[in-house]
């Protein structure tokens, strides 16, 4: 669990929710690349009508009991809860989970993705929106997690996994980083970053972006298959993953 000084994202969204409109997230990559997050905090609180179309369409695939992995401020979990689903939101950010509860999410728990286990019960849907397939971190850990997910889901379960194709960029600094990753036997879109907000700084962590062929390579032998893709106008897409019978 993150300490308070490490909970940069949680403090960011809590401050924005409480009226600090100039809250700004800074992302630092291991190669020295530093940028303001392209995601404005407002998006974490957007109503369904303001979501991108591919995210709206993705909600139609959510059924039964739902685990929202990396729930953040809870916008997806709250939307599905309002439609009668039992939703458990988890996040490694204590402040984010506090905020989910403040906003009315009935079930929310501080937990990193690596601690997910059958102790949480059985789920029909795993939700990984906000590009949160990236929380899988690496090729090896993604396969380990997907196999674990198969043990805590029903036979007809679905994973709704948002990510982005990292290679659809003309930016030389990103392309050079992809190549450096490959030279280190990492996936091109496996980025090592930390997040800063005011005087809060997260530990370094790996976040994984994958192309569609890479997604399918990761899934092979894990008990999951791609049932379809929902594309955005950008490099972002949602993979609808179904459990193999």
Image (spheres, rainbow, N blue to C red):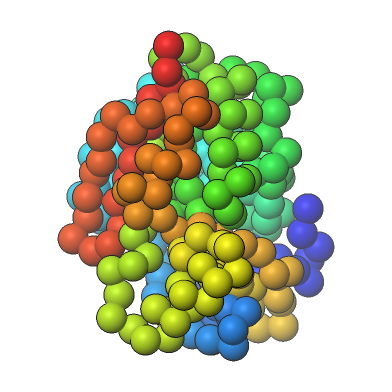
Q: Residue at x 29, y 29 (%)?
A: 227
The answer to which image quadrant residue 200 occupies is: bottom right
Quarter residue 197 falls in: bottom right
Q: Nearer the viewer, residue 74 or 188?
A: 188
Looking at this view, is 225 or 66 the one in front?
225
Q: From this viewpoint, is residue 209 visible? A: yes
Examine the rendered structure and indicate whether residue 228 appears above or below residue 194.
above
Q: How far across and how far down the image is residue 13, in percent?
A: 55, 65
Q: Residue lying furthest right in this view?
A: 3
Task: Between residue 42 and residue 245, name the one nearer to us.
Answer: 245
Can residue 22 be seen in the rendering of this structure?
A: no
Q: Is residue 176 above or below residue 235?
A: below
Question: Whole-percent x and y of residue 73?
Answer: 52, 53
4, above or below 33, in the image: above
**Residue 1 to residue 152: above or below:** below
In percent of width and height, residue 202 lies at 70, 70
Query: Residue 125: percent from the left, percent from the top?
Result: 45, 26
Q: Residue at x 68, y 34 (%)?
A: 116
Count of numbered labels shown in the rendering: 0
Judging depth in this view, the residue of 241 and 201 nearest the camera is 241
The residue drawn where x is 64% and y is 73% is 194
* Residue 58 in the figure: left or right of residue 92: left
Q: Report the side of 232 relative to 205 (left or right).
A: left
Q: Is residue 211 left or right of residue 108?
A: left
């Amino acid at each position: 669990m993150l300490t308070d000084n490490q909970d940069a994202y949680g403090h960011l969204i809590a401050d924005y929710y409480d009226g600090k409109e100039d809250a700004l997230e800074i992302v630092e990559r291991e190669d020295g690349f530093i940028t303001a997050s392209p995601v404005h905090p407002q998006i974490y609180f957007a109503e369904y009508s303001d979501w991108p179309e591919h995210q709206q369409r993705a909600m139609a695939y959510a059924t039964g009991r739902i685990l929202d992995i990396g729930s953040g401020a809870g916008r997806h979990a709250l939307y599905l809860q309002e439609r009668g689903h039992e939703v458990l939101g988890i996040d490694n950010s204590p402040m984010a989970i506090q905020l989910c509860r403040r906003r009315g999410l009935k079930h929310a728990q501080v937990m990193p993705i690596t601690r997910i286990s059958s102790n949480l019960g059985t789920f029909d849907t795993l939700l990984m929106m906000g590009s949160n397939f990236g929380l899988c971190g690496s090729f090896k850990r993604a396969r380990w997690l997907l196999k674990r997910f198969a043990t805590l889901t029903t036979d007809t379960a679905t994973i709704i996994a948002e990510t982005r194709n990292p290679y659809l960029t003309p930016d030389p600094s990103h392309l050079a980083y992809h190549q450096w990753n490959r030279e280190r036997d990492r996936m091109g879109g496996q980025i090592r970053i930390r997040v800063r907000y005011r005087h809060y700084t997260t530990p370094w962590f790996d976040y994984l972006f994958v192309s569609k062929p890479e997604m399918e390579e990761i899934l092979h032998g894990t008990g999951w298959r791609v049932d379809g893709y929902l594309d955005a106008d950008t490099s972002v897409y949602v993979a609808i993953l179904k459990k193999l019978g």
